[in-house]
Amino acid sequence: MKKYFWQLMLMLSVFWGSLTLVAHAENLNYSVTADLPKNQITKKVSYFDLKVKPGQQQDLTIRIKNSDSQKHEYVVSANRAITNDNGVIDYSHVNAKADDSLAFNLNTAVSKSQTVTVPAKTTKKVTIKLDVPKTAFRGIALGGINVTQVGSTAKKSSGVSIQNRYAYVIGLQLQEAKTVTTKPVMKLGTVKAKQINYQNYVTAQLKNTQPVIMHALKVKSYITASGSDKKIASTTKEHMAMAPNSSFNFAIGDGSQALKAGNYTLHLTATASDGKYKWNFTRNFTISEQKANDLNKSAINQEKQPNYFWWFVGFGVVIILLLGLIIWLLLKNRRQHQD
């Protein structure tokens, strides 16, 4: 039952992603469907969910429907799924760096990117060749077939052209075993200070080292100074997911605080599959003076730390003025008595 639930979630994520793209593209006038083959595991879905054998070769076909009154070109490419830094499975990255734990790279098993022309008011069939490696693989391989229209509408604003690109994505999931029993395993990679969109965070690299999707991921984290229990920054996120054999940088903090050099400790707990799997990590790390200064200089919208030097300067000026006023009053009073 749980297997069908997560298959439904995969279908909805791909469909909803496509639906969102359609809703935001004013002139998106094409659609894409998959011709599901006989080795399709789940029948009533819109993506490829295939049971394959080592060394198997197969042609996968999709159909591009051009609803426009003029012909268009479309780029068709298949990509391995990754996990983006929002904790979302992403099928759109071409040639993304593979995680060290990856045994079967889906990118090497599908034909290269191709450009096809579809006449106006026409549907065209496109073939993607699948070549499963002869060496057996366990778990699942996950990816997506992206279809992007060439030369999407460019909007002009104040003399600047902005190129909008939208893509349909059809999921592609492969497995050799009838039932996948592989369990997810999380490992903690590098912990460091990092700038994201000109805001400063501490990021923890989280790695799913197994060929299985990590569902319902929740992460609770906080940072303390080394040897202290006081929380300096904390972040909790849930409803995330991770692609097989992938990693992402989990950001801790709200981006508003200036970084301070020093020794720190990360405390992080992650759970998946509604708490069925759990991992605890504690890691010491250091932010150098140079790193903190470099990131703080280019950061925006961060809380400015008080500059006590200018407080002392201002206080000194006030003291001098008061002393000057007292001396002036004393001198004035002495003259009056002499007169």
Image (cartoon, helix red, strand yellow):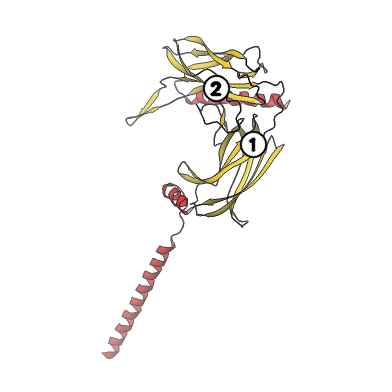
Find the residue positioned furthest to the right.
1
Residue 275 visible from this viewpoint: no
Given residues 35 and 79, the one toward you in this image is 79
Relative to 79, is 280 on the left or the right? right
Element at badge 1? strand
Q: Position of residue 24 (x, y in %)?
A: 48, 26
Between the C-alphas of marks 2 and 1, the distance is: 28 Å
**Which residue lies under the disc numbered 2?**
108
- Residue where numbered disc 1 is placed: 217
Query: Can you give x and y, in whole percent of width and height, for residue 5 in the image?
Result: 69, 26
With respect to residue 182, does 222 lie above or below? Answer: below
Amino acid, disc 1: Leu
> N-terminal of the two: label 2 or label 1?
2
Say left or right for 179 vs 79.
right
The numbered dot on residue 260 is none
Quadrant in which residue 171 is drawn = top right
Image quadrant in which you'd find residue 186: top right
Q: Secondary structure at mark 2?
A: helix
Is residue 264 shown to the viewer in this render?
yes
Name the residue: 27% across, 90% down.
338
Q: Are marks 2 and 1 in contact (CB under 8 Å)?
A: no
**Which residue in the rendered view is the most extreme toward the bottom?**
338
Q: Position of residue 291 (x, y in %)?
A: 46, 50
Choose between 243 and 275: the one closer to the eye: 243
* Mark 2 surroundings within 10 Å by alpha-carbon count, few (fewer than 14), some (14 through 19), many (20 or more): some
Query: As drawn, which residue projects farthest toward the front?
Result: 135
Quadrant that contains the C terminus: bottom left
Q: Indicate the quadrant where residue 51 lies.
A: top right
The residue shown at (33%, 83%) is 330
